[in-house]
Amino acid sequence: MKIIWRNVKYPRIDLRDGDVVVIAPPGTDIQMLLEKKKGWIDKNLRLVKELKRKAEEDIVKHGIRILDRYMDMRHNCKNPGIHGNTVYICKKRNDLLKRQLKNMLREDLNARVMKFSKILEIEPNRIYIREQKTKWGSCSSLGNLSFNLLLVFLPEHFRDYVVAHEITHLLYRNHGKKFKETLSRLNVRIPTKDDILFMWYYSTLCAQKLYIKK
Ligand SMILES: [Zn+2]
């Protein structure tokens, strides 16, 4: 367990990496907080464990999914990267594969950005692929869009959803009524909270197996 003391209004418990992280204002009785939230914490730790197991099982059974194509994985430090239906991995030269994945994802997302921006008649400025720690995507006040490299491991309908969501933010910064109405014009499947959680663990595990994330 990790405790982060921060001047937040209310204490919060985060289980993102399967570890309990408490973010609380100084002076909080952590012991009492944990006791009060024990039911919620146990239930969610069980869920995380189950999702991680499912992700591992999927990869063992099908291989690593990269832009909707399942690939075999092999160690090869002479020529790391994707060649045909195999992804060759090397811990020491992981930057080569990372660059290749970034380029593949950029090309894929550019096409989605174009498709949706045409419908909404807006023009995003620049598109970045980043290794974001907690977000799938973000948009800046300058009209730039950033997307998480982990999306390369996720299904097409989810990439569509994240792109549509961020593009809609170029028009509406919050998640209010107008935002939702506009997003619905783009006809994307809205994932459930559990879907999103699973995708986080699945894509993180893929990245770890390819040595592009710790
Ligand atoms: Zn949003």
Image: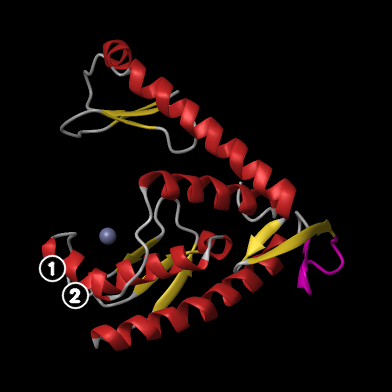
Camera-near label (2 vs 1) is 1
Residue at image position (35%, 16%) is: 38
Pick whichever of labels 2 and 1 is earlier in the sequence: 2
Give the position of the N terminus as an image quadrant.
Answer: top left
Q: Is 99 situated above or below 213?
A: below
Q: Classify residue 80 as left or right of residue 185.
A: right
Q: Position of residue 59 (x, y in %)?
A: 68, 49
Quadrant for ligand 1 reads bottom left
Task: Establish if 176 lies above or below 170.
Answer: above
Compared to 174, does 39 lie above or below? above
Residue at 51% in and 62% down: 151
Image quadrant assignment for residue 75 = bottom right
Q: How is the image coloured?
A: secondary structure
Q: Amino acid at mark 1?
A: Lys
Q: Is residue 88 magenta?
A: yes
Name the residue tied to disc 2. 171
Q: Are marks 2 and 1 in contact (CB under 8 Å)?
A: yes
Label 2 environment density (alpha carbons within 10 Å; few <14, some 14–19, many ≥20): some
- Direction from residue 137 to residue 36 in the image, left or right: left
Residue 93 drawn at (x, y percent): 75, 62
Residue 137: mark in rendering = none
For label 1, the crowd category at 10 Å Cα-Cα, with few meaning under 14, some 14 to 19 and many 20 or more, is few
Residue 51 lies, in percent from the top left, at 53, 38
The magenta region covers 76-89
Q: Assign a secondary structure to mark 1.
A: helix
Q: Secondary structure at mark 2?
A: loop
* In the displayed structure image, the side of residue 31 where residue 132 appears, left or right: right
Tell me which residue sits at (84%, 61%) in the image: 77
Spatial CA distance of label 2 from label 1 is: 9 Å
Mark 1 — residue? 178
